[in-house]
Image (cartoon, coloured by chain):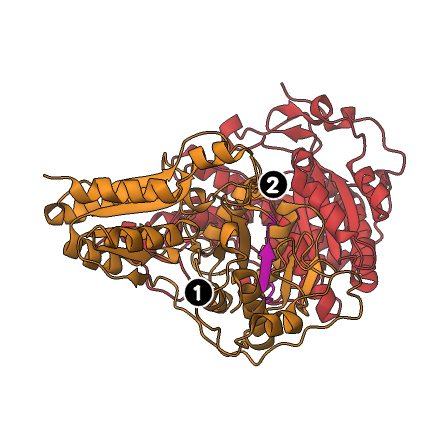
Amino acid sequence: MANMAQAIRMALHYAEENLGVTDIFGEDVGAPLGGVFTCTQGLKTAWNSPLDERGIIGAAMGLAMAGARPVAEIQFCDYVYNTIDLLKLAGNTLWASNGQWNLPMVVMTPVGSGIRGSIYHSHSFDATMTHIPGWKTVMPSTPLDAYGLMLSACKEQNPVMFLIPKALMRVRGEELIPGEPGDDKQLSKLIDAPLGDRSKWTPQWPELADAAIPLGKAKVVREGRQLTVVSYGRTLPLAKKAADTLAGEGLDAEVIDLRTLWPYDWEAIVASVKKTGRVLFLNEDTEVTNFGEHLARRVTEKLFYHLLAPPKVLAGKFVPGIGLADTLEAASVPQQGDVEQAMRALAVMQP
Amino acid sequence: MARDAKKLKPVKEFKPITRSDELPLDAERLRFMHETMVKARCLEERLIAMYKSGHGYFWIGGPGEEAFNVPLGMLIKKGQGPAFDFCHFHYRQSATLLAMGEEPLGAIRQMKNTSTDPYSGGRNFAGHFSKKAWNIVPVSSPIEVQYSMVIGTAMAQKRLGGDAISIVTGGDAGTAEGDFATCLVWSSRPNEELPVLIIVTNNTWGISTPYDQVQGVERISDRGVPFGMRTKTIDGNDPISAYLELKEAFEYVRTERKPYLVEARVSRLYGHSSASGANFSTVEADCLSLFEERLDKHGVRAKAEAKRLREKYAEAYAELARQAKEEPFPDGATIWDHVYAGEPGKDPLAD
């Protein structure tokens, strides 16, 4: 099965062949590297930009204005922060022009902890990004979802921010992408660039199919009756595993993968919370003005009389960075044990 | 305290055609230039009057730059899509719009923030034009972002072939921002040069701060020299000089498909904006009066005729303002319109 980097690569290949994507670009995105996480190896429209994030976002906006369909990469979301006003501008251009100029563009960027990336390769971006109206923001947790969400992003008429949980970039999926060979080694031989000289290498793309996942649709990855966990990205598999573990203790938890952060699937949250009465919002961005706080606020206001316990948010600690040492990273963002503990505590709370 | 633009150090290659006695353009063109400059001046003065009489919240514009901005508009190949010029303007460009053939009523409606404002539907400040039919991308208040976006439209044009170019304008103060460097770097990449006409209108002020107090580059056009691009500093107070200099630059960019950096020395006749009073400066050169002296002297247009034109347009625009005052403001419920293209406007949190 493909990992997430391969899934994104295949989606971008499908998009440049079938969805009109004209430019896939950013720092080290073109040959020979094909992206520091290999997401853009072998793509025919991939090219290297100057090391200039503002130029990357500005170029994407201009290309979109001129009828092209760009997918721009910011190498790590830690370096997207100097483009915030351009992201705001991309989000308000249609609105400010009263409907004249829409920007069909995708920006993708790896986010979050999990690779011991220290202070400037571990940032999350979901809390900040969901403060910027006019964009759609997605964050997959499986390769198949990454594939399907990328196809939808490339079909959008509006700017889409595609957040890639870098801790999951090398995790193999459990579901086949339509067209990919079932054998990992065979897939690698077809689409992974060789080490060393790549000047004569071209990928052998499998016959891929459109498996677009609509933006705004969550996925219930585990059904349960007593407790809901709403998560996305790196923390989603933690929730799933915790739910499986706690099932052995008699706790029946439902796990929802939000997949699209904006516009998010409110109906899925409502249906689940009405059933369970208990909800944990789980992500790893810093917890003050966290996206989970918005969800907790809305659940509290709209579903108060369905609740058996206060909605909880488990997120990253509000500290300036994630330290390099294992112990520091583990203390900064939710780990497996933290998630299980939070779920147990929520399950036993009594009104 | 006002400061004379002439205090800038003399510029070696500055071509003072203004002071020349010749008029190397045909009379019809000169009269069109003059009349358009008059229209632009009268329009801005009407907008200022609207602000001062409570019919608008904020004024900003380009009175004093007409001698540069009118020729600029005369040379633009207007239309929609990459086969036509793209215009990445800042907020001092009404004279350019008029020279392109735009009706003045839209600017007046935008000043009054009526729902009929064709550029932003009452959402944005005066001078913040947007017209997709002519590739005028939405003007925004940040003073630098257009220098990053322009590379994207120019890339699409380079790829398309033909002679269309991307034009970007900004002020001297904005060249301190990184986006200006972005534009220089991206437009001059080896073998990937871009057809961008990079324009800086240097009025020697950033709101209240003199240019030479905060920047040490004597000629802003010199910033382009290390990038191997053509550069020049021109007299933006003389419409004939500006037309000829711009024509040469346009032709170079159209045919060579490479960037050209033009710095135009201009006046700022009504201060930065309404925030600094919007009162007429008596110490800066008035390009319109200077031009009228010359036209009169050469028998192209008598002073009396020039005066009559000013009175005619002043009255005509006062009438347009009276018309706009009767028009409705946008309905508050429309704030949800055009957040996303292709989707009905609605409050996403209403349920």
Which of the 4 image quadrants contains residue B262? top right
Q: Which residue is mark 1?
A: A145
Query: Disc 2 on helix, strand or loop?
Result: loop
Quadrant position of the C terminus of chain A in the picture: top left
Write the start and end of the magenta stretch as one range. A65-75
In the displayed structure, B159 sits above or below A248; it is: below
Q: Identity of the amino acid at label 2?
A: Gly
Q: The chain shown in orange is which?
A: A
Q: Which residue is mark 2?
A: B62
Q: Identity of the amino acid at label 1?
A: Asp
Real-space CA distance between mark 1 and mark 2, rounded to the nearest whole angstrom: 51 Å
The colour applied to the residues of chain B in this rendering is: red
Q: Horizontal and vertical percent for residue B337? A: 35, 57
Q: Horizontal and vertical percent for residue B295? A: 76, 46
Judged left or right of residue A206, residue A158 is left
Give the chain letter at badge 2.
Answer: B
Give the chain letter at badge 1.
Answer: A
